[in-house]
Image (cartoon, rainbow, N blue to C red):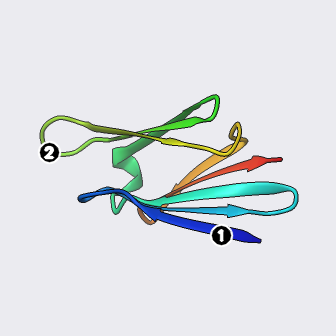
Amino acid sequence: MNHQQTRSTGDGALLRRYEYEDGWVVAADLGADAENVSVDTVGETAIVVIEGEGEPVESEFELPGEADAVAIENGVVTVEGQR
């Protein structure tokens, strides 16, 4: 397993990327409730929108490939794909 960790500047999400022989996982710790978060993937990009007080906040992050599955649990978005 190959593990990469990056943190965006400011109050951005903590991103972790795990690469395996047959696939990969990208996890982003958003600290938001699942009902306030929506995730869409387009090609090799994940688009995350967090609804809350005031205007929604939108973020994008690059993926190592096209996503096969997206899950949100306990404030963590997980995107999975195959090699």
Q: Residue furthest right?
A: 22
Residue 47, placed above or below residue 7:
above
Secondary element under disc 1, as helix, strand or loop, is: strand
Q: CA distance from mark 2 to mark 1?
A: 34 Å
Q: Amino acid at mark 1?
A: His
> Closer to the observer: label 2 or label 1?
1
Please give the name of the residue rendered at 55% of the width and 59% of the height, measured from the top-left corner. Answer: 27
Residue 22, placed above or below residue 36:
below
Please give the name of the residue rendered at 36% of the width and 57% of the height, measured from the top-left corner. Answer: 8
Please provide percent x and percent y for residue 55: 17, 35
Viewed as shown, does residue 59 lie left or right of 20? left
- Along the viewing direction, whichever of 41 and 15 lies nearer the viewer: 15
Can you identify the residue that label 1 sits on?
3
Secondary element under disc 2, as helix, strand or loop, is: loop
Q: Residue furthest left?
A: 54
CB-based contact (under 8 Å), mark 2 and mark 1: no
Please give the name of the residue rendered at 80% of the width and 54% of the height, measured from the top-left corner. Answer: 23
Quarter of the N terminus within the rendering = bottom right
Please provide percent x and percent y for residue 31: 34, 63
Please provide percent x and percent y for residue 54: 12, 38
- Along the viewing direction, whichever of 73 and 23 lies nearer the viewer: 23
Q: Amino acid at mark 2?
A: Glu
Query: Based on the displayed image, in which of its 4 quarters is residue 32 positioned?
Result: bottom left
Please give the name of the residue rendered at 70% of the width and 36% of the height, measured from the top-left corner. Answer: 66
Query: Based on the displayed image, in which of its 4 quarters is residue 19 positioned?
Result: bottom right
Please provide percent x and percent y for residue 12: 31, 56
Q: Which mark is residue 22?
A: none
Q: Earlier in the sequence, mark 2 or mark 1?
A: 1
Q: Which mark is residue 53?
A: 2
**How busy is the neighbourhood of tag 2: few (under 14 within 10 Å), some, or many (20 plus)?**
few
